[in-house]
Amino acid sequence: MTQPRFDVLAIGNAIVDVIADADDAFLEAQGLTKGSMRLIDEAEAERLYGLMGPGREASGGSAGNTAAGLAALGIKAGFIGQVADDQLGAIYRHDQQSLGVEFLVPARTDVGATARCLILVTPDAQRTMNTFLGAAQQLDAKDIDPAVIAEAGILYLEGYLWDPEGPRHAMEAAIDAAKAAGRKVAFTLSDTFVVDRHCDDFLRLMHEGRIDILFANAIELTAMTGEDDFDAGVAKLARHVPLLVVTHGADGAVAVAGEQRARVPAEPIRQLVDTTGAGDLFAAGFLAGQARGLDLERSLKLGAIAAAEVIQHYGARPEEDLKVLAAGIL
């Protein structure tokens, strides 16, 4: 097998994150439920943006965050996601490329406006997300080049993008290309609403041997298995996939691969500021370890380090040098 051009190639929603401080009174006035995520149309996105305080803009989306974290760890990363030929689309592409991520899909003029997520962060570090998906939902199977997919050691897919039909077909095509090339496929469940809608589909992919690494958090684990007990849920889901990775908040994370099992605690932090991107950066750390051939425990440790860094400041981009934090492991 040839040396891959990318250690990890991620496919997901190309969303520009706009993060601003807000208090509970603002959320109440806008009829927003703290800690929730809602989908909004372009008109509501413009209205709410006009009422928000000063914001910080950065390329986001779950898989985009993971790709950026991988690049910050010195891992060769690429990203496939759809943006429009507009100002936010240009911001997204430039931001990813400036971080060292190769952006692989050209902007289009026929897909509406580039997606954005308006993230309101309250003083208790809870994030309330208002997402306009726009162009991100227009990724098409024709955007998937099997030759490019074959150049990635690991293909990483974002569950959020499984919901719309067009991108779902694109990701199915990418999985086929990766498996045909003998590459690994990693998949993150993303959210309980995704699991509720597509649980049977995900189980089908696992039973067909098309997912090699599955990421979930404790809530998604319960949604997939019906088990309220964490360890029982891990044991149940691990039977369906070669490598299962489950995060458990302050209790750390666990990975199971057949008879191998590893668990690490959460890394200590000085202050919890913003949980945006915690799971995405955890996936980046773990995949970095796997791309470098590390064992489960060290891969989990890298994930915990990356997640701990990102929750101590606003936004889903590392501010400290992850390569320094990971020294001695990676």
Image (spheres, rainbow, N blue to C red):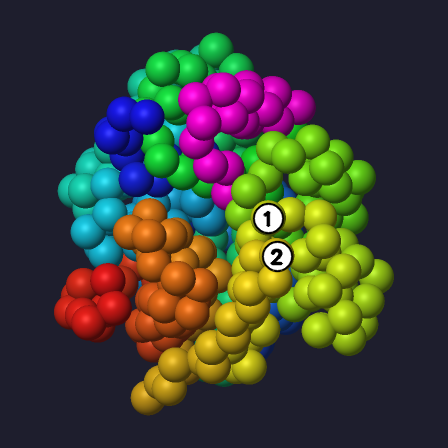
Q: Is residue 89 left or right of residue 282?
A: left
Q: Which residue is mark 1?
A: 242
What's the residue type where badge 1 is placed? Pro
Quarter location, residue 274: bottom left
**Secondary structure of residue under mark 2:** loop
Is residue 85 inside the magenta stretch?
Answer: no
Point out the residue furthest to the right here. Answer: 226
* Residue 141, percent from left and from top: 52, 15
Q: Which mark's residue is nearer the viewer, 1 or 2? A: 2
Q: Is residue 221 left or right of residue 118?
A: right
* Residue 309, percent from left and from top: 31, 72
Question: Is disc 1 in contact with disc 2, using a CB cutoff of under 8 Å?
Answer: yes
Within 10 Å of the Cα at label 2, are there few (<14), some (14-19), or many (20+) other Cα atoms? few
Quarter location, residue 282: bottom left
* Residue 297, percent from left and from top: 42, 69
Q: Is residue 245 left or right of residue 237?
A: left
- Give above or below for 139 relative to 76: above
At a point 47% along the width and 53% down the height, the residue shown is 118
Is residue 176 inside the magenta stretch?
Answer: yes
Magenta segment: 165-186
One can see residue 35 in this view: yes
Quarter location, residue 32: bottom right
Q: Which residue is mark 2?
A: 258
What's the residue type where badge 2 is placed? Gly
Please identify the dominant SS of the magenta region: helix
At a point 37% along the width and 52% down the height, the residue shown is 290
At a point 43% along the width and 22% down the height, the residue shown is 181
Residue 219, disc: none
